[in-house]
Image (cartoon, rainbow, N blue to C red):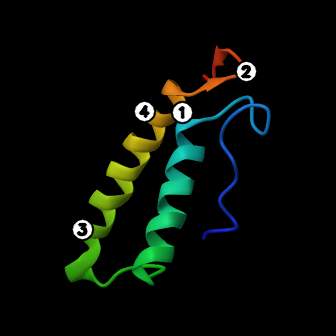
């Protein structure tokens, strides 16, 4: 869906930062909402979605097992 979001797990990326996770979440929310920057009345919902998706992404990455080992 979002081709510019890079894969954030080994062997594609060994060192994933919080900024990488947040950038991916932001790109996802921009894509599905259709807004690059939301209007002020949508800003809170937009930011909340980015934060929730970033948190879920971190949980996912920390839970993955890649070839018998944890991804992070």
Secondary structure at badge 4 equals: helix
Question: Considering the numbered disc 2 on the image, is that residue within a helix, a strand or a loop?
Answer: loop
Q: Nearer the viewer, residue 39 or 8?
A: 8
How far apart are labels 3 and 4 at the CA level? 21 Å
Q: Which residue is mark 4?
A: 59
Give the spatial CA distance, label 4 vs label 2: 18 Å
Q: Label for residue 61?
A: 1
Residue drawn 43% across the image and 79% down it: 37
Callout 1: few (<14), some (14-19), or many (20+) C-alpha neighbours within 10 Å?
A: some
Say whether marks 3 and 1 touch (CB < 8 Å).
no
Residue drawn at point x = 27 percent, y = 58 percent = 48
Query: Percent x, y for residue 28?
Result: 50, 65
Residue at (38% x, 57% y) in the render: 50
Q: Residues within 10 Å of mark 3 (few under 14, many from 20)?
A: few
Q: Which residue is mark 2?
A: 67
- As drawn, which residue projects farthest toward the top? 69
Left or right? Give the position of 38 relative to 17: left
N-terminal-most mark, 3 or 4: 3
Mark 4 or mark 2: name the one nearer the start of the chain: 4
Q: For this rendering, which residue is in front, 43 or 2?
A: 2
């Amino acid at each position: 869906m979002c081709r510019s979001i890079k894969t954030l797990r080994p062997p594609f990326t060994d060192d994933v930062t919080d900024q990488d996770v947040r950038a991916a979440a932001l790109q996802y929310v921009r894509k599905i909402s259709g807004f690059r920057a939301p209007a002020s009345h949508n800003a809170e919902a937009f930011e909340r979605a980015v934060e929730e998706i970033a948190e879920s992404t971190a949980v996912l990455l920390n839970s993955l097992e890649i070839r018998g080992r944890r991804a992070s």
